[in-house]
Image (tube, rainbow, N blue to C red):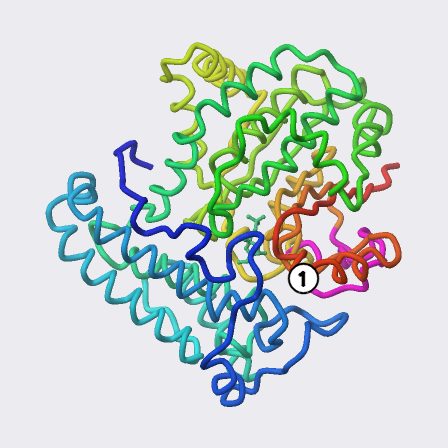
Amino acid sequence: MSDTEINTEHGSQSEDESDGSTLHSKDTLSGHDEEFDEKHNIFDIAPPLREQLSARYKHSFAYRTFRKRVPQMLNELITCMRENETRIMEQCGDYARYDLRRVIWSLEILRTEVQKNSEFKHFVDKDPGASEWNIFIKKLENREKNQWFTSTWMDAECYLYRRIWAAFRRADTLSSYDYFSPKKICSTRNNVFLLRSVLKGTRDLPRCRLHFLLILKLSLWANRCDLSIRTDAPNERFIEQMVDFDEHLIADQSEDVWHLLTEGIHSSVCPVTVDIVLDNAGFELFADLLLGEYLIEAGLAVKVRYHVKDIPWFVSDVTANDFNWMLQFFLRHEISELSAFGRKLRRFMRKKSFELCQACSFWTKPQCFKFMREMAPCLYVQLSLGALTIFKGDLNYRKLLDDVNWNSTTPFSECLSGFLPTSICALRSIKSDLYCGLPLCVVEWLTEEDPNWMCTGEKAVIQLAVKPRP
Ligand SMILES: O=P(O)(O)OC[C@@]1(O)O[C@H](CO)[C@@H](O)[C@@H]1O
């Protein structure tokens, strides 16, 4: 990712202007929806139990995603590319101007396809993944699930981000340009004072249960800062406010995670590795680096491995470039607390206490994690050699649960459909309509209070499935 200043101001909306995709806002769909729904056989119901989520259910976040959020996200991306043409040319060369026009044209076509509920097209790029995608799309065609509003939500969303990537990839000058980087860079730069205040509050914490819980929850609540949903920046008093966040934790197995790391794993026999499957860049990545730092310094792990996406994904997901950019950002920062943290991160990388794993393409495939063993055996074995894998965020959670709308009281470990390479911890602020492992009636009560609660990221869960070891 380049360090060039890029304007993201104009492409974004204020919360008031937004359209139902923003946190805290209500469902505001109306107008042409009835006509659209009738034409495309949209069911006037919420996602049925034990079914995979899909935009074919009107009362779902998936429906709103394709009716509102996705066209809006594509508009923002197009505007951002137009407004930053000169800067992109500085970075990618003069010819980028022509490539950019072609890309914008492709993005406009894509937006129309979503709005018209068109069929998925096959990929024509030369990337090795294209043929695999095309086989997958063919299968969807055979099952008549190859449209934005007939496919599952997961298939359609992953296809969307792969299509955006293909539009840039085809253009020689832009093939390795990360079109979401302006947003990701700004989200870090605009929060420098927050980063400093969090750093000040978390230096040299001795090993103890309470400190561990603080850092684990910081990593959890940082997941509220998802750039594809949230327009407001986290508050500078984030750490102090976290005490109040606790009441929003509707399933909390954080103590079990502490016990697993301190008692369940015999670190004297084999050195403990913890894997963190990252979600968003910006403040959330920072919090995940703090979590890694604490695990190492408190002797809870000897190695923390970070997993990233191989292509720009769901707007703000971390790629290897974002990870490296953040290390450099800290290292070179003029604020002493930030640069000291940067030097520590560099030390951890050099000593291999931290490892940035080679980005595995499985993370950007539409298949959920129960298929990992078969589709990405090396990744599965890698995770199984670690003591614990922490999955960050809502999208990873959806993939853990096969994107199925489980009965909300079904235990977390049951909903993993056999996926348990090692012990698994999910840190998820809830931004979609699926849940599990919750106490009886919680979903009913919350829905009575606010039918939209599950799309706001306000509530969260910390859940753990322990892998029995011989
Ligand atoms: O994984 P994250 O960053 O916590 O959330 C990803 C997300 O924004 O994308 C999906 C909808 O597009 C939802 O599952 C969720 O709201």
- Is 40 inside the magenta-drawn segment? no
The part of the image, by quadrant, that contains residue 432 is bottom right
Tell me the residue at 46%/51% (across/down): 15
* Figure quadrant of the C terminus: top right
Disc 1 CB within 8 Å of nearest ligand 1 atom: no
- Give amino acid for label 1: Asp
Q: Residues within 10 Å of mark 1 (few under 14, many from 20)?
A: many
Residue wearing tag 1: 433
**Quarter-of-image position of residue 152:** bottom right
Q: Is residue 253 above or below residue 445?
A: above
Q: Secondary structure at mark 1?
A: loop
160 left or right, relative to 8: right
Residue 177: give x, y in percent of width and height.
Answer: 29, 46
**Picture mark count:** 1
Residue for point 50% across, 61% down: 158
Q: Is residue 146 above or below residue 318?
A: below
